[in-house]
């Protein structure tokens, strides 16, 4: 364990799982609850909102900061992913000095074998992100399962911006019988409605401002979907980006919320969600919106 001190306020920080597990054993009781917020750092208000909810709903809260190499299919994206541990600690401390931070090394997690476990997520992994980022969700499943085994949380908190990831984590917990309640939390947005993401830090001020187009197109697509067909909605979104030189649409998909399968017609008794991925130069941004 290592205690970083800012303004005379100490926070428990662990770089190794053995010490973290030992410490958690000293604070657990039969009736206590542990909340867990897994992150890759570069913390923003969305992350802090997850932490606030965990603090409110649990006796103790553990936050992990770990840039997981096995979920990156693009080596350049992994290399450029922001790593701001000192700033992250300050943000956490300003929120609460009672949280526990786990900031492991790759070796502490993978023990010299930095490879993904293979998972069957009943097809959830084959859509959207899984289609465009091969192996991504095996990496997500591997790291989340490993972190759950180390932290043994009662409740774990995930943002709905990564809605497909949220559904996959729930499926992994169901299939591996881990005793964790997975909680989905609303998307936090910047003033211009761009979904908060650590990758936003890589945007120029102008790019960040103009990226408001993503949510604007999503909300207009939702309106079209109410009276139009899925095909008409998709056509509108594709046309919205077709002649935009700054933004490149990677995909726009309308899917059933439970199966994540793309749809070609609407049913009254189902919930639908739109998913989008857009490149701004080499920076990849995703967003999602409920269509019901």
Image (cartoon, helix red, strand yellow):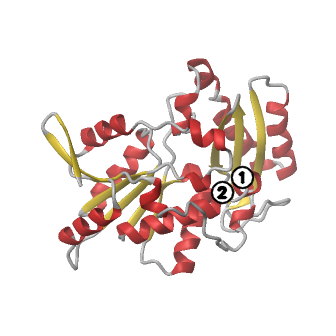
Whether pointer 1 and pointer 2 mark residues with C-beta atoms closer than 8 Å, the reply is yes
Q: Secondary structure at mark 2?
A: helix
How far apart are labels 1 and 2 at the CA level?
6 Å
> Which part of the image, by quadrant, shows the C terminus?
bottom right
Tell me which corner region of the image, top left, top right, bottom left or bottom right, holds residue 218.
top right
| Residue 229 seen in the current view | no
Identify which residue, 30 or 20, lies in the foreground. Answer: 20
Q: Is residue 227 left or right of residue 104?
A: right
Circle 1 packing at 10 Å, graded few (<14), some (14-19), many (20+), is some
Q: Residue at 45% of width from left, 51% of height from top? A: 66
Residue 175 screen position, x and y as percent: 57, 79
Q: Which mark is residue 136?
A: 2
Tell me which corner region of the image, top left, top right, bottom left or bottom right, holds residue 273.
bottom right
Query: What residue does disc 1 label?
Result: 133
Residue 128 screen position, x and y as percent: 73, 54
Q: Residue at 64% of width from left, 61% of height from top? A: 137
> Which part of the image, by quadrant, shows the N terminus?
bottom left
Vertical order, 71 against 241 (above or below): below
């Amino acid at each position: 364990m290592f205690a970083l001190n800012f303004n005379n306020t100490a926070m428990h920080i662990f770089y190794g799982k053995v010490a973290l597990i030992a410490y958690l054993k000293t604070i657990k009781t039969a009736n206590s609850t542990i909340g867990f917020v897994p992150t890759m750092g570069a913390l923003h208000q969305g992350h802090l909102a997850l932490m606030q909810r965990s603090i409110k709903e649990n006796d103790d809260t553990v936050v992990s900061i770990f840039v997981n190499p096995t979920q990156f299919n693009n080596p350049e994206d992994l290399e450029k992913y922001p790593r701001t541990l000192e700033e992250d600690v300050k943000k956490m401390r300003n929120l609460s000095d009672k949280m526990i931070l786990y900031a492991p090394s790759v070796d502490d997690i993978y023990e010299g074998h930095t490879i993904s476990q293979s998972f069957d997520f009943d097809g959830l992994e084959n859509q959207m992100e899984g289609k465009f980022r091969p192996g991504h969700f095996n990496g997500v499943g591997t790291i989340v399962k490993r972190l759950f085994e180390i932290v043994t949380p009662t409740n774990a908190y995930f943002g709905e911006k990564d809605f497909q990831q949220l559904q996959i984590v729930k499926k992994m917990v169901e299939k591996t019988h881990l005793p964790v309640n997975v909680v989905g939390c609303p998307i936090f947005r910047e003033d211009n409605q761009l979904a908060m993401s650590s990758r936003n830090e890589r945007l120029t001020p102008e790019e960040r401002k103009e990226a408001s187009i993503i949510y604007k197109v999503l909300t207009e697509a939702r309106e079209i979907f109410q009276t139009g067909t899925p095909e008409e909605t998709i056509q509108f979104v594709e046309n919205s980006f077709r002649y935009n030189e700054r933004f490149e649409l990677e995909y726009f998909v309308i899917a059933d919320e439970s199966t994540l399968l793309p749809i070609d017609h609407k049913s009254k008794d189902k919930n639908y969600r739109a998913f989008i991925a857009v490149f701004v130069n080499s920076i990849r941004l995703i967003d999602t919106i409920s269509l019901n």
